[in-house]
């Protein structure tokens, strides 16, 4: 995940409009404004669960 996040931020950050103001708390931690601080991992249980997560993403 770290490498994916780093790549996307570095190479596509400007195209995604990430050069807007960053809150002071994020500046202290040297964080950008694309990724949330933590992510939620979840093992997909079955086809219904997969469909629900795809719907959530869309």
Image: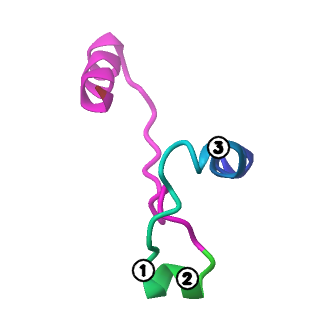
Q: Quadrant of residue 21?
A: bottom left
* Spatial separation of the CA atoms under disc 3 and disc 2: 19 Å
- Residue beneath the point at 32% across and 30% down: 57
Which quarter of the rendered picture does the C terminus lie within? top left
- Residue beneath the point at 29% across and 16% down: 51
Q: Which residue is mark 3?
A: 8
Callout 3 environment at 10 Å: few (<14), some (14 to 19), or many (20+)?
few
Sequence order check, earlier mark of 3 and 1: 3
Nearer to me, 10 or 14? 14
Q: Secondary structure at mark 1?
A: loop
* Spatial separation of the CA atoms under disc 3 and disc 1: 20 Å
Q: Which residue is mark 1?
A: 23
Q: Which mark is residue 27?
A: 2
Is the C-beta separation of discs 1 and 2 under 8 Å? yes
Q: Is residue 51 above or below residue 57?
A: above
Nearer to me, 21 or 1? 21
In the rendered image, residue 41, in percent from the top left (x then y), is placed at: 47, 45
Q: Secondary structure at mark 3?
A: helix
Q: Which residues are magenta?
A: 31-57
Callout 1 environment at 10 Å: few (<14), some (14 to 19), or many (20+)?
few
Nearer to me, 54 or 6? 6
């Amino acid at each position: 995940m770290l490498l994916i996040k780093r790549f996307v931020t570095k190479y596509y950050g400007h195209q995604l409009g990430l050069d807007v103001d960053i809150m002071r708390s994020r500046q202290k931690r040297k964080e950008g404004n694309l990724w949330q601080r933590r992510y939620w991992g979840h093992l997909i249980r079955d086809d219904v669960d997969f469909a629900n997560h795809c719907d959530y993403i869309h």
